Amino acid sequence: MNHPGLSSPGGLTWNMEVSMPESKPESSRSSEQSKAVRLLTRVLLTALPVVGVFFIMDTPTYLGWEVLREQYYGIVLAIVLSSVFLLAPFKRGSDRKKVPWYDFIFSFLGFAVGLYVAVLYPQILWRLGVVTPDRVIMSTLAIVLILEAARRLTGWVLPILALIFILYGRFAWLAPGLLQGPGIPWDRLANSLFLDPNAVLGTPMEVSAVIVIAYILFGNLLSGVGGGEFVTNIAVAGFGQFRGGPAKIAVASSTLFGTISGSAVANVMVDGWITIPLMKKTGYKPHVAGAIEAVASTGGQIMPPVMGAAAFLIPEYTGIPYSRVALAALFPALLYYICMFIQIDLEAGKAGLRGLPRDQLPPLKGVLGESYLFVIPLAALVYALFFLFLAPGKAALVAVAAILVLSLFRSQTRFRFAWILEELAKTGKGLLELTVVVAVAGIIIGVITFSGLGFVLPVILGRLAEGSIILLLLVLAVVNIILGMGMPTIAVYVLLAVIMAPALIQLGINVLAAHLFILYFGILSMITPPVCFAAFAGAAIAKASSMRTGYACMRLGILAYIVPFLFIFSPSLLLMGPLSGIVISAGTAIVGCFLLGCGLVGYLFRDLSARKRMLMCLAGIGLLIPIQGQYFTLTVIINLSGAILALLLFLLEYRQKTHSNGVRKLDPLDAEA
């Protein structure tokens, strides 16, 4: 869905309008160049998912061709790098009138380094350790082009971080203490970073080129046949009439859209144009409306079955199948949205906000008539993932096939080849930033691997934390959020999964819980000031202050910061262990979040006094503390105490509500401290 005034990350645009210079022939040449460049980029971007589908379906094997994965990654890099330099201007955010001569050179060189891998990799792999002049030149060129492409698309933070790691790999003997190493000569380092299958051409590139590409295509096609429109309509029809209805619509539609999107900013841009004006219309302040949409949309990156791109890396680093990762992430994702739903409902009750009139809501029956557009493709995806146990990329293509069949039953898409080409081009464009980011992440991973830094850092972190799990988790959460302010989530996850996850696992943390913790806090940076991209997107639509929206995000999403700590100490929330433990942990977590929400908002059936708010928070924390085997008796007592306190507070408030007849009666706990 395109909206006026918005551009994709890095300032990529389809329309490169040509200014009218004084010379008419020059104007004509510029116009011709612009058309030629647009055609070239469309061809390249359309080819990218076509090549991806060709490879994901193992077509070369069926044709009897011997194609290495790295050769396919070379084709992907060739298309991506050449497209980036044709589309993204040297100065981020500036309008591109026409492509300057030097970007044509960069584009050609980007295509050349990718083609070098695609054509020659079998010979390169046969003598991988041999350093030759052509390999050093092409590797150095590739690293420079990847870092420059990353700067244009994401800013300075990620390239600078990669440069710091490269400098460490080259001059490690200058580092202090345990970080000191022998250093690697540049010819060997460059050769390894670009051509070794454990660096640029490694796991992150595999996730982008084999898995994420299929899910971006799935999401684009699903929106194209009307699945995205159905998501919004069903949310409006189902929740619009309740108090705080527009805010609940934002949460519900973001939950559903998150199952196919996996991008916080994309979620805001799709849903926000409908939900934010509705919220403002019913009494929400602009910055609060933008914050609600941003927090709701951020949950899309943790909502199965299609989580954010970083989630597809977890199986690669843990060896746990993606179907199991998605299943484990299900309840924490639901808890994220339940917590937000609770807080929004309480805020609406406190402010006296009402729902939308019924005559402004679409008829539920009519909306359900379009449900097949969303339900059938999603069911096909779930069936392929969890019952056929297909690889994530192939499972997404099964869902794509279902969408293409459904498109035959809609007049808007039936036999429209141009529509399919448009969605393919959108998919290619959506892959540009991600592919560049994972290439930079591959450079960082390569340095960590080849320099031995991966063995040293967990030891250093363990010593700094002095064996304290809580301290290490807090450090990890803060580092995660800080890195997430300037780096994409997938880059943050890759870096911390390599550096910090081993330290957590050494302290006895469950492997999957450790990796999900890293993923969650990387995502929460999207709503944590001062740099919070989802909040900025919501603020732009709401026409509100970015910083006010960001701080409102933190307040509204405060319970979301607690969820990762809960499943670290209670893996049953990841659906692990006996059913009884899962049910108890889930129940106490939901009730605890509700009580904490009441205390933070200051509302249950009516406004709560400061003393009652404090007691509500205390009861909520008591129920949120997980029951642990090592401290079983103590944690059970704390949980029971929290439950008893919560019950007493609830009964007291309910009694006051039913007997007051609209007149507030003072009880001892209502007195301000």
Image (cartoon, helix red, strand yellow):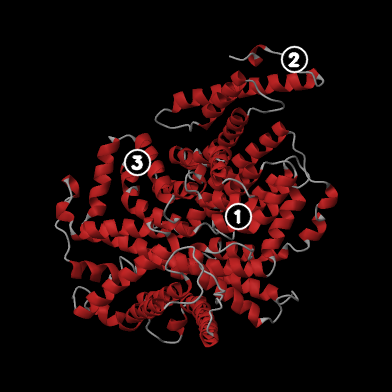
- In the rendered image, which quarter is residue 285 located in? top right
Compared to residue 203, the image places residue 594 above or below, namely above
Across and down, in percent, residue 207 comes to 43, 65
What is the count of numbered marks?
Answer: 3
Query: To which residue does mark 3 refer?
Result: 508
Location of mark 2 (residue): 665
Alpha carbon distance from label 2 to label 3? 51 Å
Looking at the image, which is closer to me, 20 or 164? 20
Residue 216 appears in which quarter of the rendering? bottom right
State the image coordinates of residue 665 (x, y, percent, origin top left): 74, 15
Q: Which mark is residue 455?
A: none
**Circle 1: residue type:** Val
**Residue 378 located left or right of residue 395:** right
Residue 212: x, y in percent? 49, 66
Residue 268, numbered label: 1
- Disc 1 packing (10 Å; few <14; some 14–19; many ≥20): many
